[in-house]
Amino acid sequence: MSRFSWILLILLAILGISQIWRMETREAPSWTLCKESLLIQTISGKCTLRKGLQDNKTVNPVNQIVQ
């Protein structure tokens, strides 16, 4: 493999590892807490919380989670 290929491979590996690490250390995006798909949420503004999340969280009209 050429030198450029090795550099590209190393950069892609660093990017992949950093993304995996970042996803493990943060909460799920607010749109994943709704039963509706992201497309339906965007069009209608409706968000029905998934079962188990309904007790202590509500969603405002722009789909942001409020404690």
Image (tube, rainbow, N blue to C red):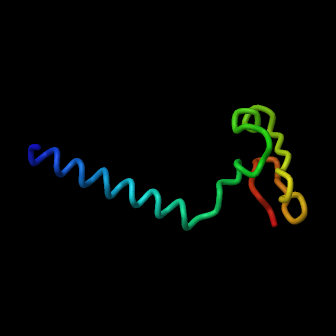
Q: Quadrant of the N terminus?
A: top left
Residue 23: image location, x then y, percent: 53, 59
Q: Residue furthest left?
A: 2
**Furthest-front residue in this view:** 1
Q: In which quarter of the image is residue 46?
A: top right
Residue 42: x and y in percent read 72, 36
Instruction: Name above or below for residue 50 compared with residue 24.
Output: above
Image quadrant where one finds the C terminus? bottom right
Question: Residue 55's x, y, as percent?
Answer: 90, 63
**Horizontal arrangement in the rendering, residue 60 relative to residue 13 (left or right):** right
In terms of depth relative to the viewer, which is nearer, 38 or 24? 24
Q: 51 left or right of 29? A: right
Q: What is the quadrant of residue 24 in the picture?
A: bottom right
> Residue 46 vs residue 23: left or right?
right
Task: Judge left or right: residue 17 versus residue 39.
Answer: left
Q: Is residue 62 above or below residue 25?
A: above
Q: Which residue is drawn at 9% across and 48% down?
A: 3
| Residue at point 9%, 44% (across, down) | 2
- The residue positioned 88% from the left and 58% from the top of the image is 54
